[in-house]
Amino acid sequence: MLYKLIAVDMDGTLLNSKDIITKKTQNAINAIVKKGIVFTISTGRPIQGVMSYNNILKLDAPFITYNGAMIIQSRTKEVLFKQDLNFMDAQKIFEFGQKLKTTVIVWSNNQLYVNKMNERTQRYQQLSMVKPIVIKDFDSLAHGGVTKIIWYDDIEKIQKFESIVAKENIDGVNFCTSKPIFLEFFNKHVSKAVALKKIGDLLRIRKEETIAIGDGFNDLSMLEYAGLSVSMGNAPQIIKEKCHYVTQSNDNDGVATFLEKLGCYDGKQFTG
C-alpha cells in the first residue's frame, strides 16, 4: 500500500522553537511531493499565519486551518469547508472569558478581533500577522459567524480555566490547548480528524493511505484517525503512546527525519 496524503501540524512540529522551517525540512518535503504524495498543513492558525511559510514551501494543497474549522486551497485561497460556532455558544464563551478577566481572541471571517489591547494581543498580532480590531458589539460580530475563540493567559490560569470549562454545560463546543497559554474553542463537529477525512474524500484518498504528524492535544484526533500516526519527540508522553511511531523533536528536524525514512520505502508501508 502506498501512502498518498501527509498532514503535518505547524507549531512544535513543522516549525522549530524559533518558528523556522529548516532547509533540511524543506528539502525533505520537496522530495516527498515529487513522489506524488500530497503534503498538507494542519494547524490551529488562520490562513494568514500559514502563507508566509508556504511562500517558502510553495505547496498547492487543501490546508487545514483553525484546528479543522476551515479548509482552504493554499494557492487560490478558496474556502473548501467552513464550520462556525453556534451563536449562543460563541456568546457564552466570550462572556465567560470576560467574567474571568482573561484576554479573549475571536476569529471571524479570517479577521482578528480582541476584547482588549494589551501585551498578549500585541504578541498574538505578531504570531498571526493580522492586525486586531477591538470588539465593540460582540453580538453583531457573532451573527456574522465566529470560527474560533481563544482565551490567552498564563499557563497556570489556562490550566485552571480548562478545569472550570469542563464542568460547564456547553454541548455544542469542543475545546483544547494548542499551546499551554491558549485555550481554544470551536464547534463540536470540528476537529483535525474531520478535516483530514474531508480532504481524503475530496482527493479520493482512503484513511489507510494517510499519515498524520503532530505534537499536541489538538493533533490527537487526526493522529488517531490516520493510517499511520507520527508523534514528535517533544510531544507529551500520552501523545507518543497513542502513535505508531515517534520521530525526533522539532528542534532536531523530526519531520525531515521521518520523511527521509519514509522516502527510503518509496512511500510504501512504513514500520520505522
Image (cartoon, rainbow, N blue to C red):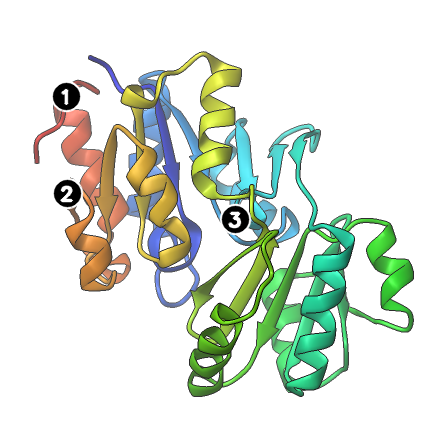
Alpha carbon separation for disc pair 3 and 2: 22 Å
Residue 144 x, y percent position in the rendering? 86, 49
Q: Position of residue 44 (x, y in %)?
A: 53, 53
Circle 3/circle 1 CB separation < 8 Å: no
What amino acid type should be assigned to the residue bearing mark 2? Answer: Tyr
Q: Which residue is mark 1?
A: 269
The residue that disc 3 covers is: 67
Q: Is residue 189 above or below residue 108?
A: above
Residue 230 place in picture, x, y as percent:
23, 43
Above or below residue 227? Residue 184 is: below
For the image shown, how many numbered marks are present on the structure? 3
Name above or below for residue 141 compared with residue 76.
Answer: below
**In which image quadrant can residue 140 be found?**
bottom right
Foreground pick, 3 / 196 = 196
Q: Say whether residue 235 is left or right of residue 270.
A: right
Residue at 47 percent across and 73 percent down: it is 162
The amino acid on which the numbered mark 1 sits, given as a three-letter code, is Gln
Q: Position of residue 149 (x, y in %)?
A: 65, 62
**Viewed as shown, does residue 98 lie left or right of 170?**
right
Q: Which of pointers 2 and 1 lies earlier in the amino acid sequence?
A: 2
Residue type at the position of mark 3: Asn
For mark 2, give the secondary structure. strand
Tell me which label, 3 or 2, sits earlier in the chain: 3
Dot in front, 3 or 1? 3
From the image, which quarter does the N terminus lie in?
Answer: top left
Q: Secondary structure at mark 3?
A: helix
Residue 245, label in figure: 2
Q: Residue at x 58, y 60 (%)?
A: 185
Q: Are marks 2 and 1 in contact (CB under 8 Å)?
A: no
Name the one closer to the observer, 29 or 188.
188
